[in-house]
Image (spheres, rainbow, N blue to C red):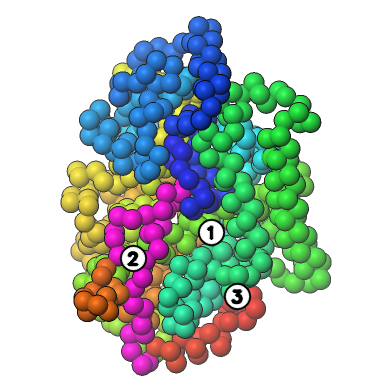
Amino acid sequence: MSAVVLDPMQNATLAGSAPPILPHLSPLTPTSTSVLAAIVAVAVLYALTGKRTKATLPPGPPGLPFIGNIRDIPKSRPWVKFAEWTDQYGPMYTLKLGRTNMIVIGRAGPAIELLDKRSAKYSSRARLIMTSELVSRGLRMTFMPYSDLWRRQRRLLHQLTSPAASSTYEPIQEQESTQIVLDMLNDPENHWPHCQRYAGSTIMQIAFNKRAPTCKDPAITRMRAINEMMTKTAVAGRYLVDSLPFLNWIPEALAPFKQEAHAIFDETLSLFKSHVDDVREAVAGGDDAHCFTKYILQQQESYQLSDNEATFLAGAMFGAGSDTTADGISTFIMTMVTHPEIQKKAQEELDRVVGRDRLPNFADQPDLVYIGAIVREMMRWRTIIAGGLAHCSTEDDTYNGYFIPKGTVVLANHWAIHMDPELYPEPQLYKPERFIKDGKLVGTKFSDLGHHGYGFGRRICPGKHIAERSLFIVFSRLLWALSLRPSVNPQTGKEEPPSVDAFSEGFSSHPLAFTCRIEPRGDWVREVVELEWREVGSDKGGRK
Ligand code: HEM
């Protein structure tokens, strides 16, 4: 989620975490003068009566009275502008967004210092009245303030997503990755829906023991629809209540926005509940149902979670883990199509380590060093949540001579951090080799993984071990089976590679629609993949 308005319609998700972190602070574009006048009036009132902060925040671009920098922030790919400001103002600078201060961090060092090492102070989220409080009734983890409920949910989730727990879901990822290879072989043109199906079905199995054999399966289409409804409510300027919080006092009967939020909440809860009830029934009927929901229900009482809190904990995983993973796979395909020499090197490694008689599997991971580096470099070069997801401070703090008051929004701009030329020489180039030393995978002085694509501190992505496994198994299997090349223009006979810069604008981003040639690497491929599918392609659960 970026700190500013992105259009979630183009890539709705991280349902637990829709695009804009501060829709009410984003470049407001109200069309009516009366709306604008009302906002200005409230801003004047606030300026006269509101709490003033000390003037020792890190300096940043000068803004206008009352609205500050709101109008300086581009709607499209704001993280790129934020990175330019990092070059101009330094690793930390302040943007004034109406009455809120937002510190943007563009280098790994200060991000680690504040968000990791002082995470007790920097682990809350900014207030999102429409999307979090009204549409989600405060139940979506990604939007939750740092609270007792958030801590209980995170503790429970930690058990379900630790490295050891994540490895128990590998059979699901092996099954789904076999299908994505088959889908690409059988229907190469629809590579993007295949990525979405892989990601959606994998997370539905992990969360609810339910799989989606096609990308039109209601198990995922309904979850996507719910998600989109929620993320639409986060578009900047759409709901005045986010700019004028006192409107939240209006009774629901007189507030259409509250009625709308109520309807979305009811629909979401009823869908999540239906999945939870199916798991409950399956378990009662003796099904093993190895999925988050089973364990959440088992521990609901000891973690003092109400029915709705438990239901949303399971339900919100789809929004958080589905599009992000699909975006990563699509980015990988674009990257291989545009970097044939890297693809060739990876395939040489696969031939050497795996051979041509079987698909790669998780046991091969320690030996597939180059594939590991491809995953890391994808996460750095075209980081999936490019703008980062803003944290919010809950105590006053001082750092490097600056005073950071409680309530400051702190955004680690992943894009700028990953384009730091000191940490990543020639950062614009896609170079997996930067993460290999003496034949082994290496990180940076700030991160063992070599990047910060899963965020920071106590809010770091809880699904990262699951996501890492998905990226590894899917990338290695697609590379093992397929040759990924640019399309050929029939008129000129020349290859036309996709753009490496055309990305969707949503909270997490993927390459805009592109064509490419996806073909089997050789005549041995189909037989091996079909054989594997016969073993693992049961209705759910993969190889037992
Ligand atoms: C490649 C895929 C993924 C990427 C790039 C990604 C990235 C992120 C990032 C950057 C954050 C915000 C961290 C911060 O605030 O500093 C986040 C939060 C979150 N992610 Fe992921 N994620 C991925 C997959 C997943 C999966 C598979 C799951 C679930 C199994 C998941 C569940 C969550 C949840 C629940 C949060 C909210 C945590 C909180 O606010 O406390 N993510 N993710």
Label 1 neighbour load within 10 Å: few <14, some 14-19, many 20+: many
Q: Is residue 437 visible?
A: yes
**Is the CB atom of the residue marked by disc 1 within 8 angstroms of ligand 1's nearest atom?**
yes
Q: Tell me the element at label 2.
A: helix
**Image point (36%, 85%), residue name:** 520
> What's the residue type where badge 1 is placed?
Ser
Residue 334 numbered mark, or none: 2
Quadrant of the image occupied by residue 476? bottom left
> How far from the left and from the top, in percent, is residue 305?
73, 44
Q: Gap between marks 1 and 2, in whole Å?
A: 19 Å
* Residue 450 image point, x, y percent: 31, 52
Residues drawn in magenta: 498-524
Q: Residues within 10 Å of mark 2 (few under 14, many from 20)?
A: many
**Left/right of residue 69 with respect to residue 311 in the rendered view:** left
Name above or below for residue 517 compared with residue 267. Answer: below
- Residue assigned mark 1: 322
User: Where does the image place residue 124, in percent across and percent down from the top left?
Assistant: 53, 33
Q: Residue at x 38, y 47 (%)?
A: 386
